């Protein structure tokens, strides 16, 4: 079984100086010695500096978004080759903070557009294809809102998102993907999805991949959970059989709490390696 992936999504936190200080603190935690793959996703502006600072460690670098064109008149956008040049290996695609919620009532429209950047499954799909073409590993985020969960639509929403997000990819490409199940209502709220339910939805994602792409792709795809992962709930989540790691927001901004989550993944790996 491959090591679990613990990825830190720093979101819009961190000047270059702040990011470098956090990386230094992480380096002191000696995460390379642990059985877990670790990735940090700083803002675009800190990617280059963080890449330099991570040299000589096994910590991977991730970006928080990517555009699907290689170059051109796309003001503000960042292309896959630009990320590759900065030493990026993972890229978060389709995070709920970038997905759009169109069709909302008029008074909320402006705020919704400002909060979410109009992403939909079609653009997620284009970005996933472009990222793969350039050797980047997408971390594809899917998740239902509270209203969708309360309406009993969780499985339908997740199924539709996964299907559209991988549309047109061949099974070998899908097998390279990382999915992150991030229920929107659990993000930044402190309200974590309980572990068996998170496991059930992660299993559903793998099941959808099996249906569309076959068993081999489903076995190599990795499915993370994200949404209020903290040191005190990480163990329960990470020991679930269908959860292959975590996408951590707030708790990744602190070296101690992030390292503690990584060490939970390590302990679980040790136990599994010893047949436990
Ligand atoms: P929190 O861990 O802060 O809830 O954020 C989760 C997330 O959105 C990671 O991508």
Image (cartoon, rainbow, N blue to C red):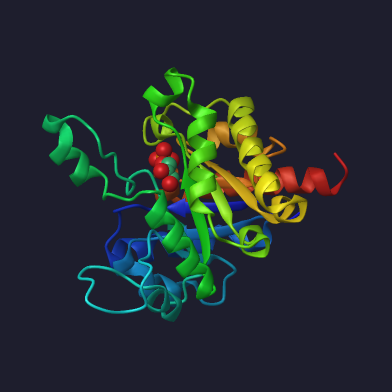
Q: Which residue occupies the foreground of this view, 65 or 247? A: 65
| Identity of the residue furthest to the right in this view | 275
Relative height, residue 56 to residue 44 (above, below) = below
Query: Image quadrant of residue 211?
Result: top right
| Identity of the residue furthest to the left in this view | 107
- Residue at 69% across, 35% down: 240
Residue 35 in view of the camera = no
- What is the quadrant of the C terminus in the image? top right
Image position of 171 (left or right of 257): right
| Identity of the residue furthest to the front in this view | 168
Q: Position of residue 206 (x, y in %)?
A: 66, 43
Relative height, residue 129 to residue 123 (above, below) = below
- Residue at 41% across, 25% down: 148
Q: Which residue occupies the foreground of this view, 3 or 175? A: 175
Q: Position of residue 33 (x, y in %)?
A: 67, 61
Q: Position of residue 266 (x, y in %)?
A: 69, 49
- Residue at 43% across, 31% down: 186
Q: Position of residue 222 (x, y in %)?
A: 64, 51
Image position of 3 (left or right of 10): right
Q: Which residue occupies the foreground of this view, 85 or 212? A: 212
Residue 26 in view of the camera = yes
Query: Image quadrant of residue 159?
Result: top right
């Amino acid at each position: 079984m491959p090591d679990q992936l613990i990825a830190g999504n720093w979101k819009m936190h961190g000047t270059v100086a702040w990011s470098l200080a956090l990386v230094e603190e992480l380096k002191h935690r000696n995460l390379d010695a642990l059985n877990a793959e670790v990735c940090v996703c700083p803002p675009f502006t800190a990617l280059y500096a963080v890449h330099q600072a991570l040299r000589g460690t096994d910590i991977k670098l991730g970006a928080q978004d990517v555009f699907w064109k290689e170059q051109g008149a796309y003001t503000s956008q960042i292309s896959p080759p630009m990320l590759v040049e900065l030493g990026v290996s993972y890229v978060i695609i389709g995070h709920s903070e970038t997905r759009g919620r169109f069709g909302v009532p008029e008074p909320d429209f402006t705020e919704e557009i400002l909060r979410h950047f109009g992403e939909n499954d079609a653009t997620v799909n284009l970005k996933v294809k472009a990222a793969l073409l350039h050797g980047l590993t997408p971390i594809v985020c899917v998740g239902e809102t509270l209203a969708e969960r309360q309406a009993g639509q969780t499985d339908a929403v997740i199924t539709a998102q996964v299907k559209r997000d991988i549309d047109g990819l061949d099974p070998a490409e899908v097998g390279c993907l990382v999915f992150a199940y991030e229920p929107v209502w659990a993000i930044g709220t402190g309200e974590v999805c309980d572990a068996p339910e998170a496991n059930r939805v992660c299993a559903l994602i793998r099941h959808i991949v099996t249906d569309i792409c076959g068993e081999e792709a489903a076995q190599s795809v990795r499915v993370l959970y994200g949404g209020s992962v903290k040191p005190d709930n990480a163990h329960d989540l990470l020991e679930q059989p269908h959860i292959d790691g975590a996408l951590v927001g707030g708790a990744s901004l602190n070296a101690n709490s992030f390292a503690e989550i990584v060490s939970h993944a390590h302990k679980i790996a040790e136990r599994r390696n010893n047949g436990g």
